[in-house]
Structure formats: C-alpha cells, structure tokens
Image (tube, coloured by chain):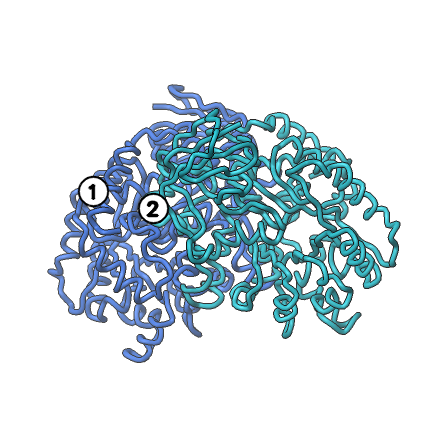
Chain colours: A cyan, B blue
Amino acid sequence: MGIVIRDALAILPGVQAAEDFQIGKHTIYITDDLIAGIDQKPEGFSEDRVIDGKDRLVIPGLINAHTHSYMSMMRNSADDLSFMDWLFKRVDPIEGRMEPEDAYWASLLSQIEMIRSGTTTFHDMQMHIHQTTKAVSQSGMRAVICRGLVGDSYDREDVRLRQALEEMEAWKDCGRLSFRLGPHAPYTCGPDYLRMVADVAKEKGLGIHIHLSESMTEIENMKKDHGCTPIEYALRAGIFDVPVIAAHCVQLQEGDISILAEHGVNVVTNPASNMKLGNGFAPVPELLAAGVNVCLGTDGAASNNAQNMFREMGHLALIHKGTHRTPQCVGAAQVFEAATAAGARALQLNTGSIETGRKADLAILRLDVASMMPNNNLLAALCYSADGSETDTVIIDGKIVMENRELKTIDEEMVYAKVREMCVRLGL
Amino acid sequence: MGIVIRDALAILPGVQAAEDFQIGKHTIYITDDLIAGIDQKPEGFSEDRVIDGKDRLVIPGLINAHTHSYMSMMRNSADDLSFMDWLFKRVDPIEGRMEPEDAYWASLLSQIEMIRSGTTTFHDMQMHIHQTTKAVSQSGMRAVICRGLVGDSYDREDVRLRQALEEMEAWKDCGRLSFRLGPHAPYTCGPDYLRMVADVAKEKGLGIHIHLSESMTEIENMKKDHGCTPIEYALRAGIFDVPVIAAHCVQLQEGDISILAEHGVNVVTNPASNMKLGNGFAPVPELLAAGVNVCLGTDGAASNNAQNMFREMGHLALIHKGTHRTPQCVGAAQVFEAATAAGARALQLNTGSIETGRKADLAILRLDVASMMPNNNLLAALCYSADGSETDTVIIDGKIVMENRELKTIDEEMVYAKVREMCVRLGL
C-alpha cells in the first residue's frame, strides 16, 4: 500500500541539529508502515492514495509519553483533592469496582481523544493490560504498555509481573505494540521488589516506566522512612541500570538532577496533572540544561482531565516562562521536540520525526483555520495557538486511522454508549 | 424572531448564590435579543426556529474581558522577547506600518476564532477604533471598545480622545456596541493626562479600561519616577473614581489589593499572556479572597497567541493550583464565573448568565465528543477538558452567528486571503 502526501508544508528535523526544525513544502511517500521517501519517489512506488497537501501541515504524530488510558471514565470526577486523597480515596476505590472490560472501553475513549488531537503513540501504565492491548490492536495506535506493578518482596512469581510477561509474549508479533515493566512508584514498591523488577528488566532487555518524585508528601515520607529521595531510592534498587522513563520528577532535591542526567534517565513531564494535583512545576529548564531527555505526557484523564497533547504543549511552553520570569525559557522548538522525537527516543521507537525510514506516524493539520492564521511561524502556532482540533487526518504505521476528522477504526457512538453505562454502574 | 432550544443541558446561576452554578435539562425561549423564558413559554411566543438540545450543553457565551483584536496578524511573530522589547521593538513598529483597514481584517480574524470557541462578547483596546466597530457591526458579536489613549498633558482636545468620543456618538444606537475610555497604562499616560481622562469619564458617565502592574519593569520604573506603585499612581490620578477594568495586575505590591478591593476595581487576569511575556502569575486567589471581581481575558494574539477562552479557562484553573501547591485553589466554578458573569458585571452588560431578561448570548456545545465524555461534571469538563472546538452553535443578541460550526456573518475565506496579503505587506 502506497500513500503520497503531495506538496504539503511539513516539519522536518533540522539539517545541522535535529531539534532546529525546518519547515518547508514537501511530498511524502509512504510504503506499508514506513516513510519511504521525501520529495523523491521510491523505486516501484505504488501510488494507491494521494492526499492533497494544500493548506495542510504535516507533523510527526505526537507522542504522549505518560498516561493511564483506562482512566478516562474518571474524567472530571476526582477534582480538587490532595494528591494522596485523590489516589487512595478516589482513584483506587473506583479502580477496585471496575470490571476488566471497562478498561477496554475507557482506553478506546482516551484513544479517540488522542487520535483526534494528533497523537499517534502513547505510553500507558495500567492494571487491565489485556484489555488495553486489545483496544490498541483495534484502534491502530502505536503504544508502549506497562502493567502497573506493586509489591514488597523479591518475588519473581509476582502475579502482576507474570501477567505482564504473558501479555508481552502474546503480542510479540504486533509491530505497533511494545512493552516495558511498570513498577508504580517508590511508595508502592518496596526496595526488594524494585530490585527484582530491575533484575527481570535486565535479563529480558526491557525498559522500565515508573512514577518518581511526584508530590512533596512522597519526598517527605521517603526521607522519613528511607533517609533518601525517591530518585536515590530508585538508584539504589538498581532501576537506573536499565533504560528508564520516569514520570513527573516534580519535587527534585539537590543532587537528583545529576543522578538522572548521569544515568540517562528519560523524564516525562506532565504539566497539567502536576498543577491540578497541587504538586507544582517540574524543573524542566534545569533538566534540559543538564542534558536530560525530557518528553511530554498528559497523565491519566483523572488528573488532567484531557488527553490532548496540544493543551499539554501549550502548558509546557508557558508555565516555565511564568515560574522563571523570562519569555526566553522553554521555547516552541523545545516543546515540539519533547512532544515528538524526545518521546520516541525515550520509548526506543523508530518514530517521532519525518525522515525516510521512520515509521509512517503522521498527523495532518489544517492551516486554513483561524487559530493557525497567519501561517508564518508554525512551530509557535502548534504550541501557543492550536487547540488540537486542527488535526484533520492521522496516519499510524502507514494506515489512515482518521480522515477529514472521521475515525476509521473506532465506532465512537458505541464507545460513548458503553462509557455512559459504565459510569452509571461505577457511580461516577 | 423566536428561537427555542429544546431539552438541552444548560448551566444556570445557582438558586442560593449565582456562582453555585446548577446544571440541568431546560428549554430556553429567545425573543428578539433576549432570553424570554426558561421552561416557560412566553405568551405569544413565535416559534420560528427550534434547536434540538439532545447531546448539547448551553452555556452563557464567554466574555473575553481584555484583548486587542487587531493584533491577530502578529500571532506567532513576536515570541520569546522581554516585555519591553516585545512592546517597543516588535509590536509598536508593526503597528506603525499598519494601514487602518488592516485592523478591520485582523479584528475579524480574532472574532472568527472567538466565535468558534464560544465567546460572544469581547472588550477591546486598539488604535483603529473605527475599523473595529465596523468589523463588530458585521460579525454580530457584542463588544465594548476602547480607543487606546496615551499622552502627557491635561489636554481635553487630545486627538485620540476626540476619535473615541466621535466613534461613541456614531454608534450610540447599536445595541451590541458600547464604549469605555482606554488610557493605555501608567507608563504611557502622564498623571495630568490620566486626570483629564478620569474627568471626562466622570462627566460622560463612562467606564475606564487600563493596563496596570503588568511587568516588574513597570513597577520598578514607577517607583523610581513617581515613588509609588502603578495602582497608587492610578488612584492619585482619580482613575478609580469611575468604574474601572484593570488588565493584568500581576505584580501587585503590599497595599495594592486593598486599594483595588476598596474602590471596586474590576481585574481582568490574562494568564497565558502573563506567562508568555515572562511577567509571572497574577495573585488571583488573593484578589478573589479580598472580594475583587476577577474576570478573564486572552489579551491580544501577539502575546497569547490564541483568542480561545477555553485555553484561558484551562490555564486559570490550573496555574494557581501549581503556584499555591494545593488542588483546592481556584476551582472550576470560580473559573467559569470569571469567564462569564464576572466579565458582564465588569463591562456593565446585561449578559453573562442564562436568566430570563438577559441578552440572548449563548454558546451551544456538543456533549457527544470524547473530550466531554463522560458528561457527569460539566463545569469541570469546560475548564479542564474542553478545547473550545466543542462549540457547535453560537447565538449573540438573539441572532445565530454560527450554526453547526458554520459561520453565518463572516466570510472566512475572504478574511484569510486578506490576512495573507497583509502579512506579506507588513513583513510578518
């Protein structure tokens, strides 16, 4: 199957440095799941579909590097609570009442919102791993999935770990799905358990996805109970010996940033969630200055409450200018990098930029709409002006999953009906 | 002309306190420019148009209480600059090159974006007042317009003031247009000039719209030159003797909040603009606690860079939770109040809430979209989840200006073509 996007503006990596994005008119050739050529038609290209690029901007599909896609039915039902009350009094009890199949429909609801706002890949942590993989296989999205792990002892027979490994085995042939191990957080994983997860990750060549240093309560408890920061705790447990994606990293203490930088830990910042739960602002400018790979995520809909990466890019581009009192802090290119290529690097995926040989994960946006007008600085437009609804067509793994705002893979009406039923049953 | 919106969810003022919004299913009757009844058909009602309320939410049209609508062609062309460089090195020179008619097309561009995201009223400060009034007369929006005034001496023959007064006279019969006097800021208006503006406002019964305490540079210069804060400077000039809307109020010093509260000054907060220009975060929770009427605005597109009040509601709902490190700070109801009724109070307009006898300024949003699903806490959904594109139909002054996302009053293609031409000419 060959798709050509003809004469569209496109955001390509810079020539000298990838993060100096260059914007120009290009024709993009897609063969099967890959970008097969830019401005040069690949030999033997089969032009099965032509997409007119007039008034369109092609961007690498956005990468939501930290979310919990099953949480969308909790959207707007857990507001204005302290972090620990939010987690243990609101989210946990609802999760306890969920049927496994609920996670399937809720994940599809999140995925509708993500696709409609130009996201092509998400990094998910949840309990009902089998339901989410099933939902991803239907939606056509690219996903890296982690079964949330919690425990105390060095138990390699841990039931959650076994579920995770079984699921990986079952989906090992699906090109759009990959997996990491997901120890939830230092305050829900004892040191021995964490060490066990790190050992399994090393043996199996898996990366790790963990929440670190999200709230001040977490820091205080960790200091009281273990005399160290959550970052030091993770370091001691051997977690940083494997490729790690650490979500949040809001409350970093002296020395933490050096540890993250030294061990090549990837940090996902989740600005809306961190503000909404009263956790504050992650030291993103300082992390970037230390050379840490910073990517961007929405977090789950229970604490955001959207799954729209354009909102998140807007927050990331603005809040640090506010906290640091300078308009020169965290510019549009850095934000776009965080939402695309940095996420791909962290997730070890061959996507996140428009280059020959990369996976064909693309979002095509309308430029003939007020929010994108004038069209003269499109990187800024994406971060400061766009709301996500400019997304017109989305291609993932070389397949068109949305065309002219019509979803091709998900029955939206059915999902909404199921979510409504679920909310009544769960008392939401 | 009678319009009925049948069986839609609607956000009405609370019974005990208006700001405790109540959400329920209602039928809304519109006669001419007014809401003529809620659930009770007015006598002799002429049912000319019926809008089906299934899967729809009716909200009072949003009120953008501070913007510069002619600035939209500068969108994304003045990023990452310090406030004073932004104003004097970038914005001012572009303004100097503008032809008056440019302000007409640029204002229409802003108005397209505003209508499409549910805004029905805006409060504008600009130079080409005649062009903006013309644009508003075409678009069908409600607007309060101020000719930006700058000067040094007590000169009642000031040319800008005369333009402002002439324009008011010319449009005195247009129900959608009203006017205030717009002295730009303490650093562009000398004390005698400000006193003159205050005197004219008193004589003519006009309100005032002014920028106050936006940047630290402004505070420092004011202290150096006049030994007081900008708030004290405005107070001494007699500005607060008339109804005032003060934009920004970011850098408030000790005593400033008491002055604002005592004199009933209305404050417009512009979170995106204040962050983008590195000015920081206005003390909104403290202003609200002091009883100040706080409303919400986007500011001009040169410093936001959007004119979408949903983005702005999202910022307002989140940033203060971040700065104050508590999820209980500035809740969804307070945000929605700031974006609707508080703006109407400040602008002295009979709009901003769904009540019989108010102007029929309404936005009708889709609920059968992912970002609004589930539909169980819609006030939160508006602030934390919606991106504005949920806006389906907009009624202003009893006229349908957008229906099923199709604009009825503005030729979008024409506006975009004119803006493209203008950008080439202005070197944007």
Q: Secondary structure at mark 2?
A: strand
Residue identified by numbered label 2: B122
The lab-note entry on whether marks 1 and 2 share a chain reads: yes
**Residue A321 at x, y percent in the picture:** 45, 63
Which chain is mark 1 on?
B
Pair 1/2: label in front: 2
Instruction: Please name the residue shown 32% across and 61% down the image.
Output: B211
Taking depth in this image into account, of B392 and A308 the one nearest to the observer is A308
**Residue A246 at x, y percent in the picture:** 66, 58
Residue identified by numbered label 1: B172
Q: Is residue B372 above or below residue B180?
A: above
**Residue B360 at x, y percent in the picture:** 38, 34
Residue that protrudes farthest toward the front in the picture:
A43
Number of numbered labels in the structure image: 2
Q: Is residue B167 above or below residue B234?
A: above
Name the kind of residue labelled 2 in the image: Phe
